[in-house]
Image (tube, grey):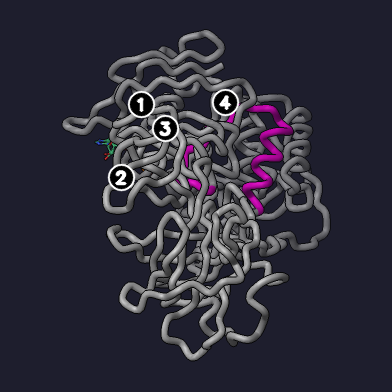
Amino acid sequence: MLQITGVSRRFGEVTALSEVSLDIRQGEFFALLGPSGCGKTTLLRILAGFESPDSGAVTLDGADLLSLPAHRRPINLMFQSYALFPHMTVAKNVAYGLERERLPRAEIRERVEEVLAKVGLAEMAGRRPQQLSGGQRQRVALARAIVKRPRLLLLDEPLSALDKKVRAEMQLELKRLQHEVGITFVVVTHDQEEAMSLADRIAVFSAGRVEQVDEPVALYERPRTPFVAGFVGASNLFEGAVHDGGLDGGALGVLPGTGDLPEGTPALLSVRPERIRLEDFGVPDEESPEEPAESPEPAAESPREEPVSEKPESVEEPETAESVEEAVSEEPVSEKPESAEEPESTEEPETAESVEEAVSEEPVSEKPESAEEPESTEEPETAESAEPEDAAGPSEGSGDAAEGSEGGSGDDPGEAPDRSKDSGAPEGGGVLRGKVADVSFYGGVSHISVVVPGRPAPVLVAAQGATRVRTGSAVALHWAADDGVLVPQ
Ligand SMILES: Nc1ncnc2c1ncn2[C@@H]1O[C@H](COP(=O)(O)OP(=O)(O)OP(=O)(O)O)[C@@H](O)[C@H]1O
């Protein structure tokens, strides 16, 4: 549907885009994901017609797009700042684009009603933006973007102004709406969780280049470049060379992994934290003479961390229904206009009742209002150290996936292993052994950092639920060959 072929763009010395080629399908929710400065906004601006590439081609439904001026492209762009007109009602904000096209009044009313119902704002038609929550304003912006029925909707960091709970709710909403209206969405984001939860496919950008295009799960489970392995989701990356189907990690020995790479190829081994099972040998020198090794429990193998199970806040407030017709009669307010949606009309806002008259309202954009709360930064809690040692038995029924060792690992769960006082590491099985440096618990997941001799960065282990592993514990780390992905360097 949208074909981008060999698009490049330089700004002086900076290469914003380098030979970018993408094929975006009809009805797809497609994400451009990458760190700040990797070129994703430049590509969006090229698609919207605000920027031209130095070279390359873009076609939409087979027709050249680059030769069309921005306003003639069947494309709409939704910014994160919403750019709503504060003195206009919700209905008028949504109607604005249609009024500029001078569509018949009845059709405008019908389409505005229809789209407000779709985004769940029928009851809010008569409100002004400042009387809405951040999530509701976001929906108005979305309604305004889709009411013109574009072939393609471009969304630039659409949810970044929302607080965490509303964002989670809006992610679902955006997905539902995209499915319902059937418009192809291209979203730009630097937030990999957002891209993973929204998109059908994701193009990961780095320094102006496309590193990999894939579905979220494939991107996560089979990264094809070191950048993708490091950028998408948390990962433990080990350097070395392919050996015997795994990775020769030098001092760390041969680490299990899979990949279709020839023996000796320089490679990274990527092992996701939740793929590692942790066998706990307890804190050495502790006053608990009889502390057996944790009995094995199969690790809960979830390819991704569970989302925080907080209930989305309800942002709706009950109010008396107002019709779209009523809603367009508005008192002007004397807010200072700002730039946003290229206002053409400079007439004074009026108090007219009709939709036609609403066209002459002076559009005033607003800064994103600060009703949204800043994103809450969750403090990781220290999960287990405060828990009494004897609170639960170490084995069955604990639900602690991290502490289970795989049945096939060869460790005898009933046998307390020796403890090395020097390293704190147990003897015996495990791919690697080390000592727990930190345990934190957030998002329903225990995050455990393990210092492994011979490796500068700690190995990260994630386990569903609260763990009983404590800082200072000697542990063995287990993973199977299928849990490690070899990535060529
Ligand atoms: N008009 C411009 N003039 C000069 N340099 C520019 C211009 N626009 C973009 N750049 C540079 O091009 C590179 C890519 O910018 P772009 O805005 O596309 O990145 P991005 O991935 O969208 O980043 P962000 O997430 O921070 O918006 C950056 O190094 C940026 O500084």
| Secondary structure category for the residue under label 1 | loop
Distance between the alpha carbons at the discs numbered 1 and 3 = 15 Å
Q: Which residue is mark 1?
A: 262
At horizontal 55% and vertical 55% (from top left) the residue drawn is 409
Magenta residues span 169-193
Q: Main secondary structure of the magenta part?
A: helix
Q: Are marks 1 and 2 in contact (CB under 8 Å)?
A: no
- The image shows residue 38, relative to residue 237, as above or below, that is above
Badge 4 marks a residue whose secondary structure is strand
User: CB atoms at circles 1 and 3 under 8 Å apart?
Assistant: no
**Please, what is the three-letter code of the amino acid marked with disc 3?**
Arg
- Residue 38 placed where, x, y %? 33, 38
Amino acid type, mark 1: Pro
Q: Quadrant of residue 40?
A: top left
Residue 190 belongs to magenta span: yes
Badge number at residue 152: 4
Q: Is residue 363 visible?
A: no
Horizontally, is 40 left or right of 104 in the view?
A: left
- Disc 4/disc 3 C-alpha distance (Å): 29 Å
Q: Which residue is mark 3?
A: 224
At mark 3, the secondary structure is loop
Dividing the image into four quarters, tell me where ligand 1 lies: top left
Mark positioned earlier in the residue sequence (1 or 2): 2
Residue placed at 72% from the left, 44% from the top? 119
Q: Residue 190 has which mark?
A: none
Most foreground residue, 478 or 24: 478
Q: Which residue corresponds to the image point at 42% horizontal and 67% vertical from the top-left?
A: 427
> Under 8 Å from ligand 1: the CB of mark 1?
no
The answer to whether the residue labelled 1 contacts the one labelled 4, judged by CB atoms less than 8 Å apart, is no
Tell me the crowding category of disc 3: few under 14, some 14 to 19, or many 20 or more residues within 10 angstroms, Cα based: some
Residue 239 bears which disc, if any? 2
